[in-house]
Image: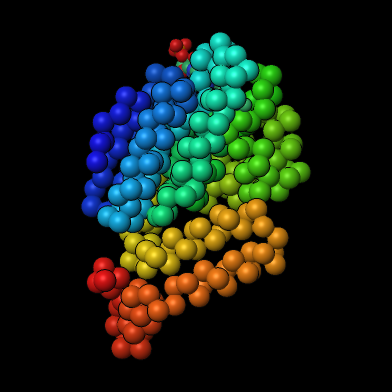
Amino acid sequence: MNTKFETITLDISGDIATLTVSREKSLNALNKQVHTDLKECLWQLRENADNLHGMIFTGAGEKAFIAGADIVEMSEMTAQQGYDFSVLGQQVSVLFEELPFPVIACVNGFALGGGCEMAMSCDFIYATETAVFGQPEVKLGLIPGFGGTQRLAKLIGRNKAKEIIYTGRNVSIDEAVDLGLVVKKFATQDEMLAAALKTLGQISRNSPLAINEAKQVMNQANDLTLAEGLRLEAERFSDIFGTAEMKEGTSAFMEKRKADFSVK
Ligand code: DAK
């Protein structure tokens, strides 16, 4: 698997990957090259997913997770290029959502515009005390273009999302926790990354198949009515009946031992 990219770094340690946007001088702003690298890397991770149980997604340095789409690059785009850029960014966010293992966004510093949107494409967000969230696109004469109008509203409620998007104001870490945008806050970046690894380790002891099914059902349910979501849940619940992992999990319970899902 190729781990060399121009604007991102991919480290794999055991069954956990760490993907870092590495444009520290531009506060990790998302230009076309970052999106192209992310798209290629996420495709490869999807193809090699059997050996992985989780991923951390973060930004290089202490100042920013991602300070948004690259404003300099965007300022010169035509409408067609803007459309292509938006589609590319949306493809990346869908690839994050479709990875068959959990992804934790670890937010250090600014997560503005496209940065906030990329974090929301992950399964959940951990952040440090210095984290600042926001969708300031309207200040630039733009609207969120990587899914922010949709995902923020679904995560925190439409009216709160409208207030944040219309004002373009910054959201502090404490407010982000209160809103449910951030799951946990940490004093330092090292503490956050250690906690994310610990959480992924804990998750990886559970059935990978069940984790993936839960992830896909919960993500897809976003676009469904409750009745449709319940039907989907019942279908996917029954799909895992009879699988080796379900047999191992239930047998281990009855035999009063820990399940070992690495045995296929
Ligand atoms: N793009 C490009 N460069 C950026 C950047 C960005 N988003 N953010 C920061 N930088 C660069 C700065 O220009 C500066 O570069 P040099 O001058 O050193 O060359 C360097 O990073 C350090 O930044 P500052 O000097 O500004 O650092 P400060 O601590 O003073 O301020 C800041 C930090 C994060 C408050 C500030 O940099 C800032 O306000 N940045 C912009 C934040 C922002 O507005 N983000 C949202 C971007 S808009 C769409 C597709 C996508 C989108 C919309 C539509 N379609 C195609 C429909 C998404 C849009 C966005 O994300």
Q: Is residue 119 above or below residue 210?
A: above
Q: Is residue 84 visible?
A: yes
- The residue sitting at 37% across, 64% down in the picture is 208
Q: Nearer the viewer, residue 240 or 175?
A: 240
- Image coords of residue 47 (percent x, y): 33, 48
Q: Position of residue 260 (x, y in %)?
A: 28, 73
The residue located at (29%, 83%) in the rendering is 257
Quarter of the image where one finds residue 189: top left
Q: Write the residue at 40% across / 79% down.
A: 242
> Which x, y percent locates residue 230?
63, 69
92 sits left or right of 77 in the view: left
Image side of residue 191 versus residue 139, left or right? left
Q: Quadrant of the C terminus?
A: bottom left
Colour setup of the view: rainbow
Residue furthest to the top: 76
Residue 127 seen from this side = no
Front-lying residue, 60 or 49: 49
Q: Residue 201's x, y, as percent? A: 33, 59
Query: Which residue extends farthest bottom?
Result: 254
